[in-house]
């Protein structure tokens, strides 16, 4: 019969603090700009990249700014515009602009990007396009058109 120590020694071993789990390895660093660019290169549908969606959102909303009394933040509105563009692209493909026109996806000039307000609108528009593309939820419920008014309006 093998010797396993006394009953008392085994009981003490059970009561001793046990070592914890090893520490989790650190998450490798991710260069956020490179990740954003990789998402922006993705095609929503053939011929329409996430970046192009962001450029159209920028063209539609670059003159807007948050103001007190708005019913939602501008970042939320930009994301809804991005969803609408994506919805139209999924329905009509490359013919989307025939049925639901939006600003053309034109890259702003370096001079325009140096303007702080334009730069912020550009970055916010790109983020809205990435998030709309990556999110599993469409807050517009499949909207294909939008009509942004300076004051509340229920007209057709």
Image (spheres, rainbow, N blue to C red):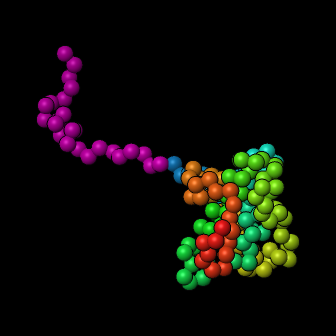
Q: In this view, does 47 lie to the left or right of 65?
A: right
Q: For the image shown, how many numbered marks are present on the structure?
A: 0
| Residue that lies at the very extreme toward the bottom in this rendered image | 68
154 and 133: which is toward the camera: 154
| Quadrant containing the C terminus in the rendered view | bottom right
Q: Is residue 40 visible?
A: no
Look at the image and give the residue range highlighted in magenta: 1-24
* Quarter occupied by residue 125: bottom right
Identify which residue, 145 or 128, lies in the foreground: 145
Question: Residue 153 at x, y = what percent?
Answer: 61, 75
Q: Is residue 7 magenta?
A: yes
Residue at 85 percent across and 77 percent down: it is 111
Instruction: From the top left corner, tell me how far across and down residue 24 is, in percent.
Output: 47, 48
- Who's the residue at 82% across and 55% down the image? 98
Quadrant location of the N terminus in the rendered image: top left
Q: Residue at x 22, y 19 (%)?
A: 2
Nearest the viewer among 124 and 28 is: 124
Residue drawn 59% across the image and 67% down it: 76
What secondary structure characterizes most of the magenta part? loop
Q: Which residue lies furthest to the left in this view?
A: 8
> Would you say residue 47 is visible in this rendering?
yes
55 horizontally vs 70: left or right: right
Image vertical order of residue 104 relative to residue 153, above or below = above
Residue at the farthest front position: 156
Q: Quadrant of residue 150?
A: bottom right
Q: For residue 16: magenta?
A: yes
């Amino acid at each position: 019969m093998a010797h396993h120590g006394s009953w008392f020694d085994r009981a003490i071993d059970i009561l001793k603090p046990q070592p914890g789990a090893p520490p989790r390895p650190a998450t490798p660093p991710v260069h956020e700009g490179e990740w954003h660019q990789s998402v922006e290169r993705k095609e929503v549908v053939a011929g329409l990249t996430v970046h192009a969606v962001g450029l159209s959102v920028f063209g539609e909303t670059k003159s807007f700014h948050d103001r007190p009394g708005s019913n939602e933040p501008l970042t939320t509105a930009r994301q809804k515009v991005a969803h609408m563009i994506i919805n139209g692209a999924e329905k009509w493909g490359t013919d989307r602009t025939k049925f639901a026109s939006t600003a053309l996806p034109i890259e702003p000039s370096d001079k325009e990007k140096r303007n702080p307000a334009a730069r912020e609108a550009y970055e916010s528009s790109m983020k809205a396009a990435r998030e709309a593309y990556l999110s599993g939820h469409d807050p517009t419920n499949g909207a294909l058109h939008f009509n942004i008014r300076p004051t509340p309006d229920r007209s057709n």
